[in-house]
Amino acid sequence: MDAIKLRAENLNLYFGKKQILKNVMIDFPENQVTSLIGPSGCGKSTLLRSFNRMHDLSPDATIEGKLYLDDIDLYDKKNSVTDIRKRIGMVFQKPNPLPKSIYENLSYPLKIHNYPKNEIPNLIENALRESFLWDEVKDELKKPAVKLSGGQQQRLCIARTVVLRPEVILMDEPCSALDPISTKKIEELILKLKKDFTIVIVTHNMQQAQRISNKVAFMYLGELIEFDSCDTIFNHPKNELTQRYIGGHFG
Amino acid sequence: MYKKKLLDTFNWMILCGSTLMVCLFLGIILWDIFSAGLSSLSWRFVSTFPTNGMTQGGILPAIVGTVILTFITTLFAVPFGVACAIYLNEYAKPSILTNTIRASIRNLAGIPSIIYGLFGLALFVKALHFGTSILSAGLTLGLLSLPYIITTTEEALKRIPNSLREATLALGVTQAETIKDVVLPKALPGILTGVILTLSRAAGETAPILFTGVAFYINGVSTAANQEFMALPYHLYMLSTQHNAIEQVRPLAYGTAAVLILLVFILNILAFYVRFKNRTQD
């Protein structure tokens, strides 16, 4: 049995009166890549965002049930939300570099979390190397991050998450705004990063889910329909809905 | 087909004509003021005191008064206005109360400036015992400017995409740090543009300072906050309607108008520059 890193227990989530997640129970294994798939509006992103408490800012979101990182209750009032977000990083659909230089994009979170000044340059170099970006940007670290290409921006955003050494990285369709070559680079990156991080990724791309995942969760209308190994979901799915979705009959 | 094309040309003519009409009015005003005021514009005019019952000399105290007055307005209205906009856009949850507050602020922008003058008289001059002074007048103009500053700042903050806020929040940065380090720097050009345009409007107001501290003539330049002061718009008003030798001081009045317009023009150019600089950066 794999060690469990992230867990949702009886998770119900509402936006106003509308129920988005229905009694979701799911365990994400440590140091593996888990993909969340399903048609648009099925609640994949909502589930992902509930782990690093991004719904805290939506006043009409209500959350019932329990979410755990190891044995830490993520919504316990005793736990600080900034600490949780430092341990559970997130990469978004559209690359969102800060309007600062490449270097400052990585030094900013380190400064905020009070890393010693003399360690910062090394941490930044390591994170950029880990994200396959160092060779492309090492001579122009002072350049505004928004001048990078879309794929480079997204790798910078991954580096910015990695630099804080989180335990989990949540990725919300990180390749949907990128071309195939950039997508390939990010996929290679994800496969490398899973050695050090637990990765949960939302994707609309079946081939991508097949290429990178250890486990795959299929969601439909706010419910978790099937959750199994990548091979089982794509080759012998047990649920009829999963079969039809994988077969491309709806979505 | 032919009819449609004719209609199209007609529409274009109406729209283009309206634009030309507006430009024409602006041109006439500027031509009128500068052609009549140019003769009195000189270094002496902006650097000396008025003499002989305003019929001669310069308008230095009025310029200094307007500058200090605008400074006090800035000091009061900008911090409060920006803070209020940050609260409304970044913190306040959408509710009936928030919407009421926002609607009230929008409505405040429509209140005639003379009412601000009377309110300033009641509050600052009388109730708070600041007397008729540059402080009372500056605060009154500040109140007048607040709704504009709040509205333009809120619009500038609204233009910052949420993805940018999420970027730092997801890194464990607090909301306050996110606002200070990411949102405000990015919104700064927009905020500054709104602030400068608001202040250039406030600098030209007459009614709010009429009861709260402006004076027709001050002996010497006063820089104390509790003193009465001279200001360009009021000076212009007096010279063009209240003076006992109106014909004689008419060139001076035109000169004053030209200086006031130039002052506002400089502020507007500044706002334009801030916006332009921001555009080339993106």
Image (tube, rainbow, N blue to C red):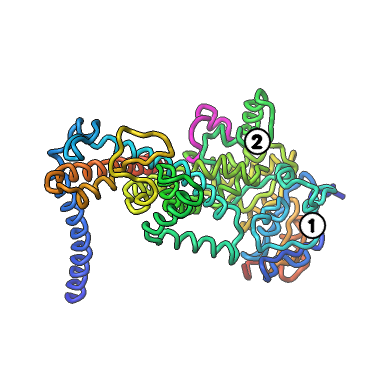
Q: Nearer the viewer, residue B162 or B265?
A: B265
Q: Toward which corner of the image does residue B215 lie, by quadrant?
A: top left
Q: Closer to the N terminus: mark 1 or mark 2? A: 1
- The Cα atoms of the two marked residues, 1 and 2, are separated by 29 Å
Neighbours of disc 2 within 10 Å: few (<14), some (14-19), many (20+): few
Res A76 seen here: yes
Asked if residue A38 lies left or right of residue B259, the reply is right
Question: Which amino acid, by three-letter code, is at mark 1?
Answer: Ala
Residue behind mark 1? A8
Q: Nearer the viewer, residue A18 or B237?
A: B237
Q: Toward which corner of the image does residue B46 lie, by quadrant?
A: top left
Give me the residue at 23% from left, 31% from top. B48
**Magenta-tinted stretch:** A133-146
B237 in the magenta segment: no
Outermost residue to the right: A1
A137 in the magenta segment: yes
- Image coords of residue B190 (percent x, y): 43, 47
Camera-near label (1 vs 2) is 2
Neighbours of disc 1 within 10 Å: few (<14), some (14-19), many (20+): many
Q: Tell me the tag on residue B88.
A: none
Quadrant position of the N terminus of chain B in the picture: bottom left
Residue behind mark 2? A112
Question: Which amino acid, by three-letter code, is at mark 2?
Answer: Ile
Q: Nearer the viewer, residue A237 or B56?
A: B56
- Image coords of residue B266 (percent x, y): 30, 40
In the structure shown, which secondary structural element does the residue marked by tag 2 occupy? helix
